[in-house]
Amino acid sequence: MRRSLVVGNWKMNGTLESAELLAKGIVAGLGSDIADIAICVPYVYLPNISALVKDSPLALGSQNVADKPLGAFTGEISAAMLKEFNCQYALVGHSERRSYYGDTNESVAARFCQAQEQNIIPVLCVGETLEQREQDQTFAVINEQLDAVINVAGIAAFNTAVIAYEPVWAIGTGKTASDEQAQEVHHYIRQYLAAKDQTIADKIQILYGGSAKPDNAKGLFAMPDIDGGLIGGASLDAESFLKIFHSI
Ligand code: 13P
């Protein structure tokens, strides 16, 4: 039985004050240990939030990680730096990084490996655009995004990784994938991995992301291959994020 995981992605939102309040609110409302939970906060808030969530079940993550270990890479943050602030997770390949900041499949694979070098669990984000879905390219796009990492890191690397399926057309649009649409792709991803390693496929957590909200989380999480969520907008409010978490 896979343990579920709910991850909040705060993106570029908040102030230090609101970030601290939000983290405190989440910790206060966690209750019993029903699943894993994490928040991916803006880099500059990591020191403060790390201190706040210490000794709580709320894990910390970053929204990206450099594709190199150290050196003259202005503006980048290395996995070793993230580790210093107790990051347990790092998102890699989020569609906003891919589309606005030029993160390629190759650099995503390098970021994935850098995270693992520091024992940070990469959350590999994959997903198709609306145009790709309409042209029946969803599975081909997912194959390509997965292969880019598998070819570099090897399938065994997925022993300590999470996958997030985030259809680009559902991110921040209020247009959630239906339970069945999401399940279809999650199942596809699991089968794709199973063809390479059944044990890893059975074990890996595959999260859904894209306009997940308190009122649709339960249906999504009830699907057999959906092991939790990567939550954007609804993770910016402690009550709604906790409602989603408690929908597991
Ligand atoms: P929304 O939940 O705001 O659609 O964002 C999803 C997302 O991109 C999480 O990484």
Image (tube, rainbow, N blue to C red):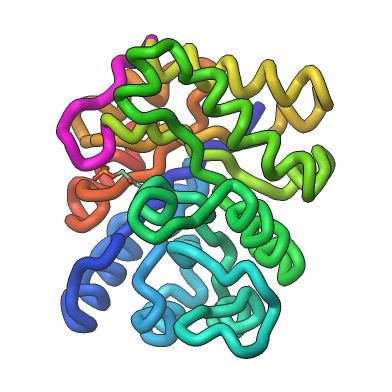
What residue is shown at x 70% (from left), y 35% (from top)?
Answer: 147
Q: Is residue 72 left or right of residue 51?
A: right
Q: Is residue 92 left or right of residue 147?
A: left
Span highlighted in magenta in the image:
170-180
Q: Position of residue 6 (x, y in %)?
A: 43, 45
Which image quarter holds the N terminus? Answer: top right
Is residue 31 at least partly visible in the picture? Answer: no
* Residue 119 against residue 189 in the figure, above or below: below
Which image quarter holds the C terminus? Answer: top left
* Residue 48 against residue 164 in the figure, above or below: below
Q: Is residue 176 left or right of residue 88?
A: left
The part of the image, by quadrant, that contains residue 174 is: top left
Q: Nearer the viewer, residue 31 or 48?
A: 48
What residue is shown at x 45% (from left), y 32% (from top)?
Answer: 127
**Overall secondary structure of the magenta stretch?**
loop
Q: Position of residue 244 (x, y in %)?
A: 29, 39
